[in-house]
Amino acid sequence: MPELPEVETVCRGLARVLEGRVIDRVVLRRADLRTPFPPGFADRIAGRRVVSIRRRAKFMLMALDDGTVVIGHLGMSGRMVIGPPRLNVLDRHDHVVFETAEASVRFNDPRRFGLMTLTAEDVLSEHPLLARLGPEPLDDSFTGPALAAALRGKNGPLKTVLLDQRVVAGLGNIYVSEALFRAGLSPRRAARTVTGGRADRLVRAIKDVLSEAIAAGGSTLRDHVQPTGELGYFQHRFAVYDREGQPCPGCDCDPSATGGIRRIVQAGRSTFFCPKRQR
DNA sequence: AACAAGACCTGCATGC
DNA sequence: TGCATGCAGGTCTTGT
């Protein structure tokens, strides 16, 4: 489900109810998700105060007052849902429950592609899940020249390469298509050909689309909800994603003549684009 | 080294 | 109604 804007939205929602609060109890309802929970997972969190909740790429990072960091990933279908304290009616796919005096937070994930694990703040950046991540796209250090350097020598299609979290961290299948549309670049172009002004345009497009999506609370297709239960609204602003055959919002060509937005499959995943406007 | 394909899961829409 | 198929916001491993 969640790409950078959805995870950012989830982290902001969780911060409001968890930051500064003590987690009294952690209920673990199965032994593993995508990966096993580490030994003592619940006990190592219970009784600790939450110092901060932040995001890196598509990972949620919950820092505790003893230097422990809970790393969470929502996979395709994960959600964090805030409810009243001491909630005793749970869904089949509620795998972890964090309890404070004021609220309960459930990690729900039907497909179980998500994960939760523990590390320590002082070795966080070396954790295998985080060590090889590329730059945060919304950081000032993510620039046209920096992206061009990361794409140098990459012969794969631009769309597929941008999904590689080592190139840039946080893009997923929706926002890659949307950013390429805004930048006027074909998803099929060899990644290494994006240099100079094209790289500048692409970086601008990535920053813009992600920022706008965060402001809209992310995109709700199937699974994403903010922790409060509110939906995201950015799906109403998609130019190309899941719009096969519909008119391209950028050119006034007749979709019955041009076919409108095209859907192709790259590396086994759908890509949407306007062949006329994206080169 | 780079890339594609398969694997991991459940749920939902579609078509017979 | 039931059943089979294909598809879904992600990553990790395997094989060429």
Image: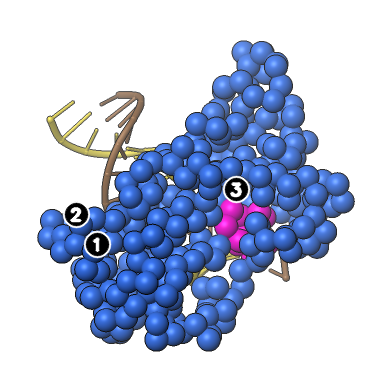
Chain colours: A blue, B brown, C yellow
Q: Amino acid at mark 3?
A: Leu
Q: Which residue is mark 3?
A: A210
Q: Which residues lie in the magenta part?
A: A161-171
| Quarter-of-image position of residue A134 | bottom right
Q: Nearer the viewer, mark 3 or mark 1?
A: 1
- What is the three-letter code of the residue carrying label 1? Ala
Q: Is residue A177 visible?
A: no
**Residue A110 visible from this viewpoint:** yes
How crowded pointer 1 is (Cα within 10 Å; few <14, some 14-19, many 20+) is rated as: some
Q: Which structural element holds mark 3? A: helix
Spatial CA span between label 3 and label 1: 30 Å
Which is in the foreground here, disc 2 or disc 1? 1
- For disc 2, the neighbor class at 10 Å (few under 14, some 14 to 19, many from 20) is few
Q: Secondary structure at mark 1?
A: loop
> In what element is the residue under mark 2?
loop
Q: Which tag, 2 or 1, sits closer to the chain's start?
A: 2
Same chain for the residues under marks 3 and 2 in the image: yes
Q: Main secondary structure of the magenta part?
A: loop
Relative to A18, residue A261 above or below: above
Residue A209 vertical placement versus A139 (above, below): above
Q: Disc 2 and disc 1: Cα gap in Å?
A: 17 Å
**In the figure, A240 relative to A160: above or below?**
above
Task: Using a 10 Å C-alpha cutoff, classify the residue at mark 3 as few (fewer than 14 neighbours), some (14 to 19) or many (20 or more).
Answer: many
Mark 1 sits on what residue? Answer: A103
Numbered label attached to residue A91: 2
State which chain disc 3 sits on.
A
Mark 3 and mark 1 residues within 8 Å of each other at the beta carbon: no
Residue A96 coordinates in the image, percent (x, y): 26, 66
Mark 3 or mark 2: whose residue is earlier in sequence: 2
Q: Quadrant of residue A80?
A: bottom left
Residue in the image at 22% along x and 75% along y: A25
Residue at mark 2: chain: A
